[in-house]
Image (spheres, rainbow, N blue to C red):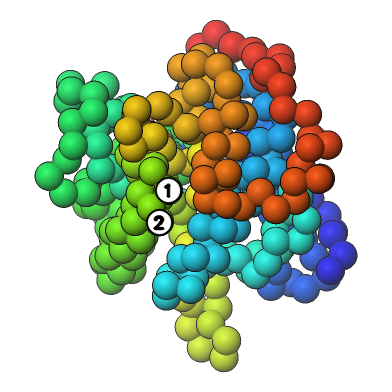
Amino acid sequence: MNKGKKLYEGKAKIVYETSDKNLVIQHFKDDATAFNNLKKAKVEGKGVINNRISEYIFTNLGQLGIKTHLVKRLNMREQLVKKAEIIPIEFIVRNISTGSLSKRLGIHEGTVLKKPLLEYCLKNDELGDPLVSKEHILAFEWLSEDDLNYINQISLRINDLLSGLLRAVGIKLVDFKIEYGKIWNEDKTKKEIVLADEISPDTCRLWDAHTEKKLDKDRFRKDLGNIIQGYQEVARRLKIMPEETNIKKVKFGKPTSVKFKKK
Ligand code: TMP
């Protein structure tokens, strides 16, 4: 599969076209950003680990009946994925209150929610990905009611499956963000909704089940240090660091060039 032109560069990934118009390559960068790009750094090796963790999670979800865009992992940093029209909403599922939920509503950090909470944010960096309601999604026709109901149901199922998969290796799934895209079905008669983007320690909050030590991007957001070690710990527990020899070639150091932009 030949890598073609760059189609899009985001904060943590680059998408390239391929010789097949229905497939693209998703490249995982080492760049880390937080607070809508106000804080930036390079975390060496992050892209390699996220590629592997996300592949593992998407493959597992796929085997459990969740449709995803993943075709296969190509190499240390790249995946071949189905080209999808990304739905402009970030779907956030929360099991424990922390982050923007605790800040916004004054809910005590660490409060276990009685049932998973679904939130929606509009994917728009210029506006800082604002929180929106179901009514906004329907009013502005970002999704039809049927598609929204379907995504809500799939998102809660992903939460159940992922919580179980992680709990089995001593990790609590505190919250996570997922994205979906639309692709044509096999016989090109209708578009279907598939899980897209990535699921990794960049897009989840993952706490050690016993100590509640953070193993995710909060290590970067909150300057806790040992970012890559947290991500590696997740990969190690999931037993998915098979390219041990290659991975050793990747330098795992402190983040370099942390920059803050004034608002
Ligand atoms: P929040 O508490 O900052 O709103 O984050 C909720 C979850 O969504 C958390 O697991 C981190 C993830 N997330 C992203 O993946 N991308 C983002 O841009 C934001 C704001 C959060």
Residue holding disc 1: 169
User: Considering the image in quadrants, where does the N terminus appear?
Assistant: bottom right
Judge left or right: residue 217 versus residue 249.
left
- Helix, strand or loop at label 1? It is loop
Residue 191, image x, y percentages: 48, 77
Residue 103, image x, y percentages: 26, 21
Report the residue at 80% width, 65% height from top: 18
Q: Amino acid at mark 1?
A: Val
| Among the 4 quarters of the image, the one containing residue 208 | top left
Report the residue at 25% width, 43% height from top: 95
Give the quadrant of ligand 1: top left
- Quote the CA–CA distance across marks 1 and 2: 7 Å
Residue 220, image x, y percentages: 53, 22
Question: Is residue 103 at least partly visible in the picture?
Answer: yes
Q: Residues within 10 Å of mark 1 (few under 14, many from 20)?
A: some
Residue holding disc 2: 165
Report the residue at 34% width, 41% height from top: 172
Indicate whether 43 appears above or below 222: below
Does the numbered disc 1 mark a residue whose Cβ is under 8 Å from ligand 1? no
Indicate whether 1 appears above or below 205: below
- Give the mark toward the camera: 1 or 2: 1
Q: How many marks?
A: 2
Q: State if disc 2 and disc 1 touch (CB < 8 Å).
A: yes
The image's mark for residue 261 is none
